């Protein structure tokens, strides 16, 4: 028949994977279910660790701003809060890399195994997904660079927080030293306000540069991109 010339054995084999999952004569469905459950548990565990870091960052930075406006408190307290937020950002970027390992595996199983089981006619997203997943189990590696993870968490969480801290700092300078030039209000013991403003400007410029994604993976547009859980 004419259609036989277009027969692709590899595509046919991929299409059979979904049917095997619902075939009671094989154990693939049971194995896949346990594997998926285990990967989901790890993903949720690391997501909780990620969220815990974010919650602590929001709580600590909010408390610092509240304290700074509670009385005659130096604006340096808010600058210290920025440094604390930066520490949390570094911690969260590291945790996000670990979280992305398990999240990526879950997405591979969802896109190529379970989706194919529900509707084998659509085929699989990636023909080599089994080989890639097997390699990942043999030699686990991170899927995103530290810079990429740092950029992602900075854009999604910390840049808005840092921007709010900047607004709070400027308002503190204006509210607690009315009538004084901002450069004078920003002075610290032994440090003129010009240098303080310059340091803050360089800090935020660096944040803006680091927030720019360098790859589709960092933007969440890769084949293993987020479908709601890459936040």
Image (cartoon, helix red, strand yellow):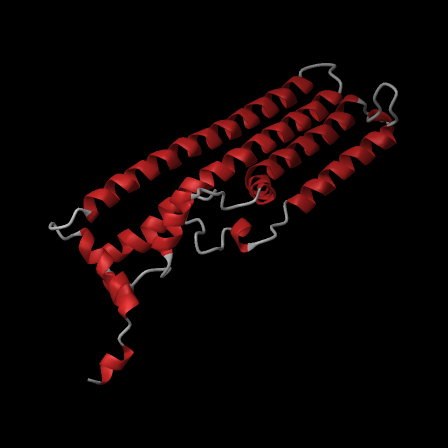
- Residue lying at 40% horizontally and 52% vertically, measured from the top left: 132
Image spot of residue 135 (x, y percent): 40, 49
Comparing 159 with 99, the one in front is 99
Q: Is residue 22 above or below residue 206?
A: below
- Residue lying at 77% horizontally and 21% vertically, measured from the top left: 176
Which of the 4 image quadrants contains residue 206? top right
Comparing 19 with 61, the one in front is 19
Q: Is residue 76 above or below residue 8?
A: above
Image spot of residue 62 (x, y percent): 59, 24
- Residue lying at 43% horizontally and 33% vertically, measured from the top left: 46
Which of the 4 image quadrants contains residue 211? top right
Q: Is residue 14 visible?
A: yes
Q: Is residue 181 visible?
A: no
| Residue at the far top in the pictured view | 71
Left/right of residue 198 with respect to residue 203 in the rendered view: right
Left/right of residue 125 with respect to residue 24 in the rendered view: right
Q: Is residue 3 above or below residue 82?
A: below
Image spot of residue 223 (x, y percent): 44, 56
Comparing 226 with 170, the one in front is 226
| Residue at the far bottom in the pictured view | 2
- Residue lying at 27% horizontally and 81% vertically, measured from the top left: 5
Q: Is residue 150 above or below residue 52?
A: below
Quadrant (top left/top right/bottom left/bottom right) for the N terminus: bottom left
Image spot of residue 131 (x, y percent): 37, 54
| Residue at the far left in the pictured view | 25
Which of the 4 image quadrants contains residue 122? bottom left
């Amino acid at each position: 028949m004419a259609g036989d010339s277009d027969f692709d054995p590899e595509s046919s084999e991929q299409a059979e994977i979904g049917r095997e999952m619902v075939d009671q004569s094989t154990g693939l469905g049971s194995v896949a279910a346990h594997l998926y459950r285990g990967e989901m548990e790890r993903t949720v565990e690391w997501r909780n660790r990620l969220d815990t870091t974010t919650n602590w960052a929001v709580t600590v930075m909010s408390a610092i701003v509240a304290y700074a406006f509670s009385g005659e408190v130096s604006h340096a307290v808010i600058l210290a809060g920025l440094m604390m937020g930066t520490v949390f950002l570094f911690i969260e970027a590291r945790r996000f890399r670990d979280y992305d390992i398990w999240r990526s595996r879950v997405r591979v199983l969802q896109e190529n195994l379970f989706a194919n089981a529900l509707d084998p006619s659509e085929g699989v997203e990636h023909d080599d997904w089994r080989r890639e997943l097997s390699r990942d189990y043999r030699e686990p590696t991170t899927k995103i660079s530290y810079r990429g993870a740092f950029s992602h968490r900075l854009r999604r969480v910390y840049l808005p927080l840092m921007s709010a801290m900047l607004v709070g700092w400027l308002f503190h300078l204006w509210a607690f030293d009315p009538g004084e030039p901002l450069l004078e209000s920003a002075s610290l013991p032994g440090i003129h306000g010009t240098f303080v403003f310059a340091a803050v400007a360089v800090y935020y410029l660096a944040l803006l540069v680091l927030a720019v994604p360098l790859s589709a993976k960092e933007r969440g547009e890769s084949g293993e991109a987020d479908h709601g859980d890459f936040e």
